[in-house]
C-alpha cells in the first residue's frame, strides 16, 4: 500500500497537508497511476484539488502541462502483441503520434513510439530495456532516463515487474 499526500497553502496562507489518501494500481498488464497533472506551465499553485480525479488516463500530459505518474510493466508484456494491436492501443490512449502500421511492422520492437514530451524516468524496481532506433540501454533500480521527444520503446528484462516514476512535460520542437 502506498499513500499520496498533497501539501499546499490553506486559505489563511499557512502550509498544510491538504489531502492524504491510499493509492492503488489498476490491475492491468501495464499499470499506470497518475499522481498529479498540471494543465499549464508555470503551474497555478492556487489549485490544490486533485486533477487526476477529473481526467481519464491519456498517454501524454495536457498541452502546456505535465503529468507525474508511476508505471509498472509486467514480464512478457508485448511479447504476443501484434503491430495492429499496438496501433489500436495508441489510438485508444489518444497518443499524439500514432506510429504507422508499416513502421511498427519493421521496428525493432512493437512498443516503439514518439511523444511530444520531455520525460524524466527513474527506475524504482526491476529492470527494463530502454529502446531507441540506435543504441539500447538496460535500466536498473536507481537509473535515470531523460527523453527528448524521440522514438523509443520499452522491453522488460527478467522475471520481475519493472516500476518507474515518470514526469512527462509537454514540449515542442522550436
Image (tube, rainbow, N blue to C red):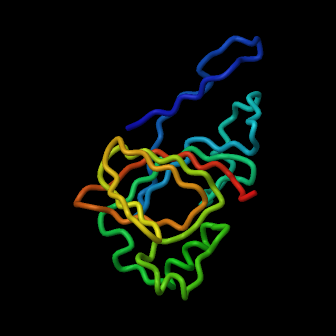
* Residue 77 appears left or right of 54: left
* Residue 171 appears left or right of 138: right
Residue at x 33%, y 63% (from the top left corner): 156
Q: Dividing the picture into quarters, in which one does residue 37 lie?
A: top right
Q: Nearer the viewer, residue 27 or 141?
A: 141
Q: Position of residue 123 (x, y in %)?
A: 38, 46
Residue at x 54%, y 88% (from the top left corner): 102
Q: Position of residue 12 (x, y in %)?
A: 76, 11
Q: Dividing the picture into quarters, in which one does residue 103 lie?
A: bottom right
Q: Dividing the picture into quarters, in which one does residue 122 lie?
A: top left
79 up-or-down from 45: above or below: below
> Total number of numbered labels?
0
Residue at x 56%, y 51% (from the top left corner): 119
Placement of the N terminus among the 4 image quadrants: top left
Q: Nearer the viewer, residue 164 or 85?
A: 164
Q: Position of residue 126 (x, y in %)?
A: 29, 51
Placement of the C terminus among the 4 image quadrants: bottom right
Q: Residue furthest left?
A: 159
108 up-or-down from 121: above or below: below
Residue at x 41%, y 60% (from the top left corner): 130
Q: Position of residue 120 (x, y in %)?
A: 52, 46
107 up-or-down from 139: above or below: below
* Residue 154 appears left or right of 18: left
Q: Nearer the viewer, residue 93 or 171?
A: 171
Amino acid at each position: 500500500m502506498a499513500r499520496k499526500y498533497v501539501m499546499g497553502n490553506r486559505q489563511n496562507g499557512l502550509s498544510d497537508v491538504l489531502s492524504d489518501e491510499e493509492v492503488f494500481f489498476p490491475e492491468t498488464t501495464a499499470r499506470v497511476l497518475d499522481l498529479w497533472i498540471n494543465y499549464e506551465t508555470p503551474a497555478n499553485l492556487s489549485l490544490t484539488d486533485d486533477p487526476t480525479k477529473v481526467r481519464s488516463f491519456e498517454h501524454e500530459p495536457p498541452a502546456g502541462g505535465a503529468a507525474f505518474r508511476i508505471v509498472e510493466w509486467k514480464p512478457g508484456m508485448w511479447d504476443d502483441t501484434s503491430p495492429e494491436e499496438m496501433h489500436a492501443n495508441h489510438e485508444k490512449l489518444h497518443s499524439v503520434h500514432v506510429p504507422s502500421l508499416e513502421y511498427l511492422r519493421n521496428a525493432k520492437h512493437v512498443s516503439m513510439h514518439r511523444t511530444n514530451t520531455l520525460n524524466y524516468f527513474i527506475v524504482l524496481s526491476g529492470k527494463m530495456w530502454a529502446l531507441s532506433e540506435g543504441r539500447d540501454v538496460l535500466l536498473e533500480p536507481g537509473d535515470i532516463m531523460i527523453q527528448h521527444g524521440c522514438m523509443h520503446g520499452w522491453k522488460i528484462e527478467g522475471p520481475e515487474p519493472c516500476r518507474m516514476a515518470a514526469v512527462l512535460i509537454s514540449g515542442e520542437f522550436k
